[in-house]
Structures are given as structure tokens and as C-alpha cells.
């Protein structure tokens, strides 16, 4: 199950492999007290800040599309919350959808600059606190809201954090500027990493059709909570030698959450076809796999044809860098033309 929050955790975990976290409160310090330090290079802070800036900025830009701007996406997201105690009814109000949709765009776009600028820092922090706790309570999205709140320490002066949370720590008073001896390597690696982070979220513009429809280029691009997808259809397996036909009941092969996705997402549909091909191969059958009557609904709109029923998905190759012609054209783009 892809989730932007998991992806961010992976990136932060990767970055942390190269941060000097072993110099404080670690087994390394216990074994070798001489390495203990209460200081870090300033670039560490700015790497985290820049990563967050990319995440939030692209999340804001991605929301600037029709179904978000008319707040219909918010209505869909809130519909499942209608039975929430105390707030369920108010979350169904159109004016609440307007507030949530507007704040969602503005918060993601402005929160990092507002935290960086001292005059707005405190107000931005308390707004961030409310925003993330609201998301945690309403959407129940795991640790991400609390991780985001924790990142606030990178936006306050170190002495401010020390006085609040670490009063027993000795303040760092040196004004000496120390440049790491690996500066050139750091600049090259950081440049490559952040260039990649800047390009991945816009790669879908090089694909045919709309990413909202095809999902091609959706992942690793910070397109957070933008749509609701439902799909339906029927998987048919045909033995190439005997022409024997098998109608597949997905429940015999996958979990309930996987079943929902193999009809609504093209890469899941392709993967399931590959899985079925492998299963039948164990019975010495060479098969084709078709998804018939494939239709999807995005944001509760009417179901539209999605995957070409004449395409043998088991015989197709999945490409990460180009469009797949067996995904039928978006009806939304056609209607606009």
C-alpha cells in the first residue's frame, strides 16, 4: 500500500543514515564517550527544512485542480466521517468543505516559510499544531501528524529548544565556523538528491493523459489525499493452447484491500495479471489474462471505461517512464476538448 507518509519516512530514514546521530544518547557514546557532542553542522538542519519545503510545496500545487477547487473532493472525504461523534454533522457542511479546502492549499504552501520567518514563527507553530492534530483525529493517518509537529524543532533557535526541553544541557556558545572536510562530496550528493526530489513530482507532465486518471507518475510526487477511486470489472483467464476460459474470483487470491485496488489502479491490475499467469504456469498452463468491463469512478463521479478489455495484461510490460496504451483515454480530458 503506497502512502506519501511512508515514502517520507523512507527518505528521512535514508538521510538519517548520514547524519551524526550517533554522537548523542547512543550506544556509540556509551562505548566511546569521547565522541559525544551536543552540536551539529548547520547543513543538517537545512537538509531537513528543504526536504519539508519540497513536500509541502508540491502538496499544495497538486491540490490546484478542479475537484479540489470546487471542494467536491473534500465532500467525498468527509462523507465517511458523517458518523463521527460530535463533529460528524458539521463536517458535512459545505462551508466547512470550503474552509478545509482553502486552508489545505494555503497551509501547505506557506507553512515552511512562515516557520522560517521569526515574526510569524510562533503563530505558524500553533496553526501547525492544530492542523496536524485535526488531521490525526479526523483522518487517522498514523504517526505523520506527530512527525510533522516534531520537525518544528528545526525551525526554532537551538537555545529556545534547550531552555524548554533540555535545561540541563550545556548551551553551545562558540561562534567558530567549522566547514566539514567532506564539503565537496556533500554538495555533489545533496545536489543530485534534491534535483531528483524536484523532478520526480513533475514527471507525470511528460506522460500522456492526466495523472489523476492514469495514476502514472502519481507516486513519489506528494499528491496527498487528492482523490477517491473505485473500480469494478471481471478478470478472465484464457488458456492459449486449449482456449479454456476461467472467470476469476479475486477473493480466492487477494485480501479485501488488494481487491479494491486491482480494479481501480492500472499497476495493481497489471501485477494481479502477472500473479495469475504465474499461478496457472504452475499447472503447466500458458494463459492470457483480460480485465473485462473495467470501469472506475473518481471522486464519486459516474463510472467510466478504464482498461482495454482486449489487452492481455499478462503479456504486457510495465514501464515506469512512459504511458501504457491499454489505459483508455480520460473521459474528463475528452469532455474538456
Image (cartoon, helix red, strand yellow):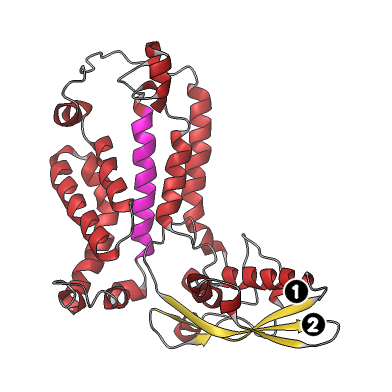
Q: Nearer the viewer, mark 1 or mark 2?
A: 1
Is residue 116 rendered magenta in the image? no
Magenta part of the chain: 43-63
Q: Quadrant of the rendered structure where residue 36 is?
A: top left
Instruction: Kindly identify the residue that appears in the image at 48 percent across and 71 percent down.
Output: 257
For the residues labelled 1 and 2, say whether their Cβ atoms are less than 8 Å apart: yes
Which residue is label 2 attached to? 239
Q: Position of residue 215 (x, y in %)?
A: 51, 68
Mark identifier at residue 87: none
- The front one of 158 and 286 is 286
Q: Position of residue 44 (x, y in %)?
A: 38, 30
Residue most extreme to the top: 34
Q: Is residue 93 left or right of residue 270?
A: left
- How far apart, in angstroms, are the residues tagged by discs 1 and 2? 9 Å
Which residue is label 1 attached to? 280
Q: Position of residue 316 (x, y in %)?
A: 71, 71
Work out whether 184 lies above or below 151. Answer: above
Q: Is residue 132 left or right of residue 181?
A: left
Q: Main secondary structure of the magenta part?
A: helix
Q: Position of residue 145 (x, y in %)?
A: 29, 52
Amino acid at each position: 500500500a503506497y502512502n506519501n507518509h511512508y515514502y517520507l519516512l523512507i527518505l528521512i530514514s535514508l538521510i538519517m543514515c548520514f547524519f551524526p546521530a550517533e554522537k548523542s544518547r547512543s550506544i556509540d557514546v556509551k562505548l566511546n564517550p569521547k565522541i559525544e557532542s551536543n552540536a551539529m553542522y548547520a547543513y543538517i538542519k537545512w537538509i531537513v527544512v528543504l526536504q519539508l519545503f519540497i513536500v509541502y510545496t508540491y502538496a499544495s500545487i497538486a491540490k490546484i485542480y478542479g475537484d479540489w477547487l470546487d471542494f467536491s473532493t473534500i465532500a467525498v472525504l468527509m462523507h465517511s466521517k458523517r458518523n463521527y461523534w460530535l463533529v460528524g454533522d458539521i463536517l458535512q457542511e459545505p462551508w466547512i468543505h470550503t474552509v478545509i479546502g482553502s486552508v489545505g492549499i494555503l497551509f501547505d504552501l506557506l507553512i515552511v516559510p512562515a516557520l522560517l520567518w521569526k515574526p510569524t514563527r510562533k503563530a505558524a507553530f500553533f496553526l501547525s499544531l492544530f492542523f496536524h492534530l485535526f488531521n490525526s483525529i479526523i483522518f487517522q493517518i498514523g504517526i505523520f501528524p506527530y512527525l510533522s509537529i516534531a520537525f518544528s524543532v528545526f525551525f526554532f533557535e537551538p537555545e529556545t529548544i534547550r531552555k524548554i526541553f533540555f535545561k540541563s544541557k550545556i548551551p553551545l556558545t562558540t561562534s567558530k565556523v567549522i566547514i566539514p572536510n567532506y564539503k565537496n562530496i556533500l554538495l555533489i550528493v545533496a545536489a543530485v538528491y534534491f534535483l531528483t526530489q524536484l523532478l520526480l513530482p513533475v514527471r507525470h507532465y511528460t506522460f500522456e493523459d492526466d495523472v489523476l486518471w492514469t495514476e502514472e507518475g502519481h507516486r513519489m510526487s506528494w499528491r496527498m489525499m487528492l482523490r477517491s477511486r473505485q473500480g469494478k470489472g471481471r478478470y478472465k483467464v484464457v488458456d492459449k493452447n486449449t482456449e479454456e476460459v476461467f472467470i476469476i474470483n479475486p477473493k480466492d487470491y487477494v485480501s479485501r484491500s488488494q481487491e479494491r485496488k486491482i480494479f481501480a489502479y492500472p499497476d495493481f491490475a497489471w501485477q494481479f495479471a502477472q500473479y495469475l499467469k504465474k499461478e496457472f504456469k504452475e499447472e503447466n498452463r500458458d494463459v492470457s489474462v483480460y480485465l473485462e468491463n473495467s470501469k472506475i469512478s473518481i471522486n464519486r463521479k459516474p463510472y467510466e471505461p478504464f482498461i482495454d478489455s482486449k489487452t492481455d495484461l499478462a503479456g504486457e510490460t510495465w514501464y515506469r517512464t512512459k504511458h501504457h496504451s491499454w489505459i483508455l483515454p480520460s473521459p474528463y480530458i475528452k469532455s474538456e476538448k
